[in-house]
Image (tube, helix red, strand yellow):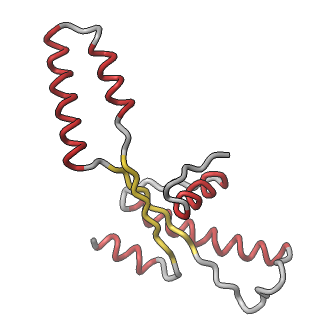
Amino acid sequence: MSSYKLFFKTCNFNIQILVQSKKEDLANHFSRINRINEFESEKVRNIYSNYYDYICNLNKKNKSSSKNFYIVLDFIYPKEISKETFPNESEKQIIFNNLTDKYLKVKECLSRMNNLCIELKEEEVIKVLYSFFNKRKEFKY
């Protein structure tokens, strides 16, 4: 907890944390178990069968899901950059540098706490945002 407290103190700028939970589909895992099961001895098949039952029961009881956490960084326009007009090249560089500094600070803090930090590519960001706003539909290009 103290590490997270330090993280929020270090990041003295606005951030938003989005959490996405997704039920895990274990069908592929189960089909692999069944495929391996066909070629093994009776003893090994019993072990696989017990494992299969265990995973099924565990999945039903705990409703397995994965969670992804996304951090959205805020940019507050300095007085010298107008919000009304599209930024010119030097203004874009100021915005880029500001967000990069914040990103590196967040990444460093989270990495220090042994969190895996991955920078999303543009199409991944689109997919994530789409999934937040359209919970029942899967994004397809």
Which sits in the foreground, 86 or 116?
A: 86
Which sits in the foreground, 119 or 19?
A: 19
Which quadrant of the figure contains the N terminus? bottom left
Which residue appears farthest toward the bottom when viewing the image?
A: 79
Q: Is residue 8 left or right of residue 56?
A: right
Q: Where 76 falls versus 7 (above or below)?
A: below
Q: Where 105 falls versus 32 (above or below)?
A: below
Residue 14: % across, % down:
52, 81
Q: Residue at x 50, y 68 (%)?
A: 106
Which quarter of the figure has residue 10?
Answer: bottom left
Residue 53: % across, % down:
18, 31
Q: Where 36 falls versus 99 (above or below)?
A: above
Which quarter of the figure has residue 33?
Answer: top left
Which residue appears farthest toward the front when viewing the image?
A: 136
Q: Where 54 falls versus 114 (above or below)?
A: above
Which quarter of the figure has residue 19?
Answer: bottom left
Q: Residue at x 38, y 40 (%)?
A: 25
Q: Is residue 50 left or right of residue 115?
A: left
Q: Is residue 84 left or right of residue 130?
A: right
Q: How many discs appear?
A: 0
Q: Residue at x 54, y 70 (%)?
A: 72
Q: Residue at x 35, y 24 (%)?
A: 31
Which sits in the foreground, 135 or 51?
A: 135
Residue 7: % across, % down:
40, 73
